[in-house]
Each structure stands twice: as C-alpha cells, then as structure tokens.
C-alpha cells in the first residue's frame, strides 16, 4: 500500500489497485520511510472507484456464462481482511439478532481504542464518520471521504463466495478449522504457530493433488481454460 500510494502521489502512476493505510498503523522502518517521503506532485488529485464488475458470470455446474439476475453488472467485493470475523445470522429472530449484536458490541467496544495500532479498518456504517482515523494521512479531506464511501458501497454488496473454488477444498477447510479450534483453545500461543502449520499442511495437500490439477481446478471454476486440458479435473459442483 505504501508503494502504491507513493507512486501515484508523486505522479509516476495513473492507476493503483490497493487499500488505504490507517493514520496510525504498525509500521516497519521501511514503511515509515515510504510514508514520510511520499510527496504529492503538483496538480495530483485522487478519485476512488470499485473494481469493475462483469456483465456475465460463469456457472461451473452448467459450464456456461450467465447474465446477472438482479442487476446489469455482477459485482463481488474483493476484501482483504486478516484475522477473525464475527457475524450474526440473517435467519435469527429480531430479538435474538439484537442480543447477538449487543454481545458483539460489548466484546469489541463502541470504539476500537483498545485495539492494537494498525488493526482498525472500515467495516461499519459508523466508520464512515471517522475518515481521519481510517484513511491515510496523505489524502485530502475530500479524498478520505470519497475513499470510505467507495469502500462502503463495496462492502454493502451481499454477494459472497463461501466455498474455496479448488479441488480438494474439504481437506483444506478441515485443516483450517482444526487450526482455528486450536487457536481458541490455546490463546497464549502466537498466531504464527497455527498459520505456519496450516501453510505446511496446505502445501502437502497441494503436492498430493498435484500443482497443475490444483491450479486448473481454480481456472475452470472461473471459466478459464485449463493449462493441461487432458488432465484437468471436472468443474466443481
């Protein structure tokens, strides 16, 4: 993010696909150098838009491209959150949902003042009123508001991809589930203990499946031609 911001602010790039960094963040010395040395070139003005959508989406079951049913353009938000996410089921009764949200609010606090630096990112409607905290210091006030408004439009999109679009996904998810359960049972251990374990086991699963079939299963699920037509797995259902 720092490199993207510096390149576009100094006039060497016209377009950047990136996220903004909060005004307070956990930084390495190199990050701080990039942050402090970014000088806005004369006449540079920034605008923010969502990544372009598609007028068609691929149905891996029917192996065909289909037009969106609800809108002319299909948008699936690309999010970059790291860590745990808490949600409340839409199927709950109004009373149960209210209790659940109150519990989450109690656990996370109305303000994230006690969260470590660098953790906060725009995820709530109320965050739109705090651009000075959730947008980078190099942005002008109007640009901060436009950035958060664009993020808000993207995150309100309810289209989600809940399955890993690769062959062997049950094995990958089983490893991830086990690591999450171990992390909750042993909160004193550093997170790297679990993430490194997941990465190692995922790599082993990939080797068992084969790198090429694994890659091609993902390509097929996105409507792309496999690199190895003769050995490609069937489309995921």
Image: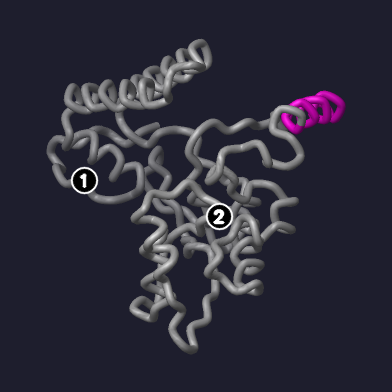
Where is residue 84 shown, x and y percent of the image? 54, 31
Under circle 2, the secondary element is loop
Q: Residue at x 69, y 33 (%)?
A: 108
**Which mark is on residue 103?**
none
Find the distance from the CA under tag 1 to the CA under tag 2.
40 Å
Mark 1 vs mark 2, foreground winner is 2
156 lies above or below 218:
below
Q: Which residue is mark 2?
A: 22
Horizontally, residue 50 falls left or right of residue 97, namely: left
Quarter of the image for residue 59 reads top left
Q: Indicate yes or no whether the magenta region holds residue 21.
A: no
Q: Which residue is mark 1?
A: 226
Horizontally, residue 2 falls left or right of residue 138, namely: left
Where is residue 81 shown, x and y percent of the image? 50, 42
Q: Residue at x 61, y 55 (%)?
A: 134
Quarter of the image for residue 100 reads top right
Closest to the observer, 188 or 107: 188
Task: Provide the major secondary structure of the magenta segment.
Answer: helix
Q: Is residue 135 visible?
A: yes
Q: Is residue 55 visible?
A: no
Where is residue 67 shown, x and y percent of the image? 50, 57
Answer with mark 1 or mark 2, whichever residue precedes in sequence: 2
Under circle 1, the secondary element is loop
Q: Quadrant of the C terminus?
A: top left
Q: Residue at x 39, y 78 (%)?
A: 10
139 lies above or below 168:
below
Where is residue 68 shown, x and y percent of the image? 54, 55
Q: Are marks 1 and 2 in contact (CB under 8 Å)?
A: no
Q: Residue at x 39, y 56 (%)?
A: 31
Q: Which residues are magenta?
A: 91-105
Quarter of the image for residue 85 reads top right
Please, which residue is most extreme toward the right here?
A: 95
């Amino acid at each position: 993010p720092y490199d993207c911001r510096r390149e576009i602010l100094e006039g060497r790039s016209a377009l950047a696909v990136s996220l903004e960094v909060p005004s307070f963040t956990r930084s390495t010395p190199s990050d701080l150098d990039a942050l402090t040395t970014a000088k806005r070139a004369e006449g540079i003005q920034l605008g923010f838009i969502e990544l372009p959508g598609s007028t068609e989406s691929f149905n891996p079951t029917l192996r065909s491209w289909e037009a969106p049913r609800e809108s002319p353009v299909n948008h699936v938000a690309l999010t970059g959150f790291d860590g745990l996410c808490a949600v409340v089921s839409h199927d709950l009764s109004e009373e149960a949902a209210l209790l659940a949200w109150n519990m989450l609010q109690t656990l996370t606090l109305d303000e994230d003042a006690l969260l470590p630096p660098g953790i906060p990112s725009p995820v709530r409607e109320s965050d739109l009123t705090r651009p000075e905290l959730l947008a980078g210091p190099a942005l002008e006030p109007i640009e901060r508001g436009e950035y958060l408004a664009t993020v808000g439009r993207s995150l309100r999109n309810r289209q989600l991809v809940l399955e890993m679009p690769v062959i062997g996904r049950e094995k990958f998810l089983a490893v991830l589930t086990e690591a999450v359960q171990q992390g909750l049972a042993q909160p004193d251990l550093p997170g790297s203990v679990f993430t490194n374990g997941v990465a190692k086991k995922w790599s082993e699963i990939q080797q068992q499946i084969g790198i090429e079939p694994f890659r091609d299963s993902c390509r097929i699920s996105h409507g792309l031609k496999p690199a190895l037509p003769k050995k490609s797995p069937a489309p995921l259902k």
